[in-house]
Image (cartoon, grey):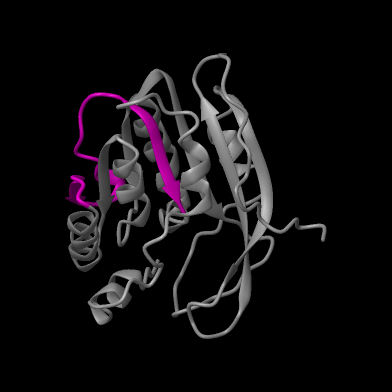
Amino acid sequence: MRNPWAREYAKTPDRYIWGKTPSPFARELTALVPPGGRILDLGCGEGRDSVYFALCGYDVTGLDVSAAGLEKAERLADERGVTVRWLCRSMLDVPVTGRYDLVYSCGTVHHVQKDDRPRLFKRLKALTRGQGFNAHLVFTDLRVYVEKDEEIDYFTAGELAKAYSDWLVIRDEDGLVPCSQDGVQHLHSVERLVTTPVSQRVPALRPEIPPVLLTA
């Protein structure tokens, strides 16, 4: 599998490929995390969501395999006056202890090979507090667009939800998200899943900018 984004981060030291504004998904999820809660951001890239979570007052750990991406993430954190714990490691080797109120990924877990995902999700569940949450946005195979020569083990229909079949699903929706990172406007099909290990009353999640419906 080929993930080109570490190379792209290194090629653009003075530009944030994904911008500095947090993703809509990250903004929605703050409704679920208690004040001062712990968040683990997997595949945090240039740090836009990790820094946003830290600005909201959370204790944040951002993990990515790209040292160049994390250098930009640290610069963004300094610019915004917040502290984030940065780890340059693979998602399959999460070197953290304790439990988190939110384990989060946005557009990254599909870079983990399918055969390795059961081990990853087992680890992520073990890192989640009893009333915590896991939230993931992944690329699916319903609409494939290859950019930057990347190789992705796309999620199939129901695969992500099946990984959390023993948890309570708060949100599970398919959609399309726009992208133009290769200079061509295109769409990626995605699935967004938010889950918790126990039945509990949770705030309603209002999508800030919902994905385009696949049926549209």
Q: Position of residue 8 (x, y in %)?
A: 32, 77
Q: Give the left or right position of residue 212, taking residue 166 as reference.
A: right
Which residue is found at the position 30% from the left and 50% from the top? 51
Relative to 68, say whether 25 is above or below.
above
Q: Nearer the viewer, residue 67 or 79?
A: 79
Q: Position of residue 104 (x, y in %)?
A: 41, 41
Which residue is found at the position 40% from the left and 28% from the top? 125
Relative to 216, say whether 58 is above or below.
above
Identify the image quadrant of residue 66. Answer: bottom left
Q: Nearer the viewer, residue 188 or 185?
A: 185
Identify the image quadrant of residue 215. Answer: bottom right
Stretch of the chain drawn in magenta: 81-106
Residue 193 included in the magenta stretch of the image: no
Residue 89 included in the magenta stretch of the image: yes
Quadrant in the picture for the N terminus = bottom left
Relative to 151, say whether 203 is above or below.
above
